[in-house]
Amino acid sequence: MSKRYEIESDSQQIIAREPSTKWGGSWTEEKLDAFEKYVNAYLTIMNTYRTKWGWKLVYFDGFAGSGSRHELIESQAKESTLDLSKELNITTEDLATYKGAAERVLNIKQQGFDYYYFIDKDGSSSEKLKEKLTPIQNGRNFVFRSSDANEQVRLLAKAMHEKSKLKALVLLDPFGMQVEWDAIRQLEGTGTDLWILIPTGVIVNRLLDRKGELKFINKLTSFFGIDEQALRTYFYQTKQETTLFGEVEKIEKIKEPIKKIAELYIKQMNTIFKHVTPQPLVLYNSRNTPIFHFACASNNKNAIKIASQIISSN
């Protein structure tokens, strides 16, 4: 029996059931399993009110990829200002996250979105996804853009500020740190539900080197939306160590840095959205190391209630 989520709104009880489709169970697909369940619940609730309030629903995938299970997402690593795979010793396993959200969203068996935006900076991937999805378009409004996700998020936010009837479900799941904090900030005050993949262990923790040299500080400040001093204060502590030559100041990285990275990002998201999942979904690699945290943010408390239930049951 599929799990159901009960939400009370305007004295009405709305029941959203998980989709019955079964998709693999490996760690690389945990993210998509959780997101598919959320999209199904989101549409159940929004479909109850969309006609009454005249809402137009937008699905926005900022890193849609090619939609192929067998292709690595190395193009995303190339987008970064860093050659991540070489600089940070990133493995093939770390890169091989399956990019298949678009197909799952389109296969949900209920009234869908008014507009579907599939964004990918790599033109080849965008064309491949278009070829893959066109046969199942069935009259739906698809928009494929080969463009930077940050630029497109800003354009979406501008449209939503101008047209309050627009409601968006946004998925930002890059492999690396391509998402700029300033772009997310533009969504403040809009009817946006945002799911974002935070590369806590696979990327960010490696940039926060043990000695606090922070060679890529511009990348870190752009990602977190805080300045260098705030980052150093949060992730490092200074201790006095006695040596033969007297007192020496030693810089140490905080304990459990991956957990702290996620906590800081959640804290930052709370400055933009009224509600954020306090405990994001943690994704592990085969070595049982946390490499990503998958979090949801919204201005609707019911959205986070559902997201948290899905995360806790995953």
Image: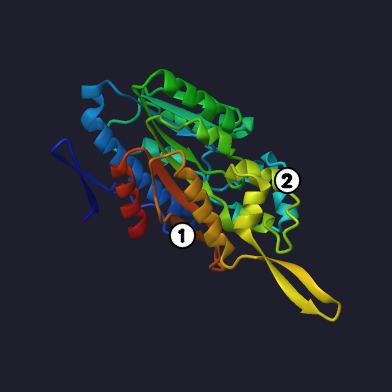
At a point 53% along the width and 68% down the height, the residue shown is 288
The quadrant of the rendering that contains the N terminus is: bottom left
Asked if residue 77 can be seen in this view, the reply is: no
Residue 227 in the image, given as x and y percentages of width and height = 64, 44
Residue 114 marker:
none
Name the image quarter holding residue 40: top left
At a point 46% along the width and 41% down the height, the residue shown is 271
Residue 82 marker:
2
Foreground: 102 or 182? 182
Name the image quarter holding residue 177: top right
Measured in 3D between alpha carbons, the distance from the residue under mark 2 to the one under mark 1, in whole angstroms, is 29 Å
* 2 or 1: tag closer to the N-terminus: 1
Q: Which residue is mark 1?
A: 26
Residue 310 in the image, given as x and y percentages of width and height = 33, 53
- Name the residue furthest right: 245
Residue 139 in the image: above or below residue 220? above
- What amino acid is at disc 1? Ser
Q: Residues within 10 Å of mark 1 (few under 14, many from 20)?
A: few
- What amino acid is at disc 2? Leu
Q: Secondary structure at mark 2?
A: loop
Q: Residues within 10 Å of mark 2 (few under 14, many from 20)?
A: some
The quadrant of the rendering that contains the C terminus is: bottom left
On the rendered structure, is 224 left or right of 5? right
- Name the residue furthest bottom: 244
At a point 43% along the width and 22% down the height, the residue shown is 161
Asked if residue 312 can be seen in this view, the reply is: yes
- Name the residue furthest left: 11
Foreground: 177 or 298? 298
